[in-house]
Image (cartoon, rainbow, N blue to C red):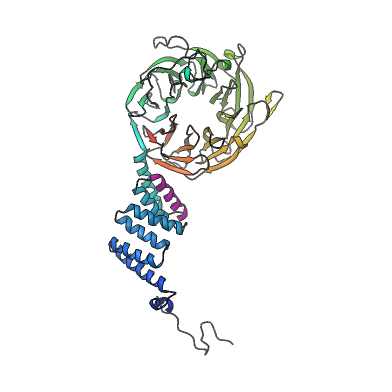
Amino acid sequence: GGAGAGATASGARAPRPREGWTPAGVRDGAANDLAKPTYFATQAKLRGNESFAARDFAGAVASYTEALEWLPGEAALHCNRSAAWFELGEAEKALRDAVAAASASPRYVKAHYRCALAYSTLGNHVAAVARMRKALELSLSSEECGRALARIEEACARDFLALNLVGHGDTVQDVSWRPPPPLPPQHRVDSPPSSPSPPEKSARPVLATASLDGTVRLWCGDSGILLHVLRGHEDKVTDLLWSRDGAYLVSLSLDQTARVWRVAVEGSAACVRILSGHSGRATAAAIFLEAARDRDPGGGPGGGHLLATSSTDCTARIWRPFDGPASPASPAAAEVGVLAGHRQMVTCLDFCSRLGKLATASADNTFRLWERHGGRGEGGFACTQEVDWGSGAVNKCLFVAVGEKDLLVTSHFDVKFERSRVLVWDMGGAAGWADGKLVAHAMHFEGFGGKVTCLDAAAFAEDGSVLLAAGCSDGTVRVFDLASKGDVMFDLVDEHLPAVGSASPSISALAFSPDGSKLATSGLDGRIHLWRSDDGTHVMTFNGHRDRICSLSWNREGTKLASCGWDKSAKVWKTGAL
């Protein structure tokens, strides 16, 4: 037989290398031109490591610099020198080395980690969060990266938190910015001469909060000063709705009433109407014009504006609360009519001003379309469509304009299989219509592993997209482009964590910025995530609430985001620089 493995030519077995043995070319690197750079760089790196361990960070910098002279661009050497610079308080130099390391080796976890620490120290928390999230992604499950990311997010919360509004005695269930007053008629070419002029005095930014303590509070959106406490409801207040000119605020309560408040320019307010008639709690509200031909571009509440409310009593009601003298002494409002026919609670409603249609969604698995027909139907409203698609309870409905086309978005929850569908219906009378009846949806979105908890839509001006976002109880957010026949743009998953004591990472609220460029999402974990709407890139995390978040609201300029939740507080975040 031939010589065995490890045998010499003479048949004798060669000795095994000693432990710690290095090739002669490296061991004698000082005399080997090819090995010399690696040899001397390795020796300098070892000295640098010893200096770093001894907390001689200046000595470590000198040794790592010597090593880089032999091996320029070596990622590990740049990363080690970044750590030494960081310990010396030289954050800018630490950042330069960390960026060089990440550029040389894009999947080097420590390089991104060092970048994040340096960015955070320099106050660039947006870049810090992005780098630490990259490090966490590359490391798969690094506890160190996770803890560091949490610390950076807490620093972000301190830097971006503009106001912390406390004073409510229970959960703050809803938050809403007052819209700015409309432009004067001389600045609005489409405004009829009869449109009421806005107040001469400039309106201060006002933020309204509704609480389960039974009150509504009005705050100055700049200073956080409490302007007014609105009392009168006999049970928890759940929802708020401003008129488009910001002159009226509607509050919904578990006491089965809605109240209408006249809000002055400076923020004082008084109750002018109490809307009682529902035998269950109100679930949603919408303000709209009584007739499409009377459209007022300014959005003022006078001149034929109506209010619709839906309720757990299986009805929706139409009110005329803005006409006549506003006197707290006689707060009763004229009820225009009751929209009956649903067999279970009416979960949601919305109004399309261009079509003059009102949509109501119900737990009876149907949604209905109503139109104003001057004397026909209850209070002049008649049901023109009842659609039962057999997809479960309809818990959300939302009208969305896509160019000249109007769409209705509905979400359907199948309780048996615990899954949802989102359907999109063309209201133009063409696609999905037969003999004047709506018989098929134009788009449908599947794959929701729970109940759709929130919907929002926005037009993204940069590319003409019309975005629809749907948040689900399974913790995911899906974003679609309705202008491109419902293409799925991206899914946002595994970002919101379950609340303490809960197995669900449910999305509790989401909202597009007014220009559609950013999307804010919140969950039961008390965290708010900001995303770029065009590609789903994560922008920032606000980690300030101590418990689940109930509602989000952007100001008209998109420079501030308000949030509220179970920790009995509302917060205002600065978003203008993001």
Asked whether residue 91 is in view, the answer is yes
- Residue 6 versus residue 365: which sits nearer the camera? 6
Residue beneath the point at 43% across and 50% down: 131
- Quadrant that contains the N terminus: bottom right
Please give left or right for residue 84 compared with residue 379 in the image: left
Q: Main secondary structure of the magenta part?
A: helix
Q: Is residue 571 above or below residue 282?
A: below
- Residue 362 versus residue 299: which sits nearer the camera? 299
Asked whether residue 420 is in view, the answer is no
Q: Position of residue 448 (x, y in %)?
A: 56, 40
Q: Quadrant of residue 113?
A: bottom left
Q: Quadrant of residue 418?
A: top right
Q: Quadrant of residue 545?
A: top left
- Quadrant that contains the C terminus: top left
Residue 490 falls inside the magenta stretch:
no
- Residue 554 versus residue 327: which sits nearer the camera? 554
- Residue most extreme to the bottom: 10
Residue beneath the point at 38% across and 64% down: 68
Q: Which residues are magenta?
A: 123-142
Q: Position of residue 217 (x, y in %)?
A: 36, 24
Residue 125 falls inside the magenta stretch:
yes
Q: Is residue 179 above or below residue 544?
A: above
Q: Position of residue 29 (x, y in %)?
A: 40, 76
- Residue 175 versus residue 33: which sits nearer the camera? 33
Q: Is residue 572 above or below residue 284?
A: below
Residue beneath the point at 30% across and 65% down: 51
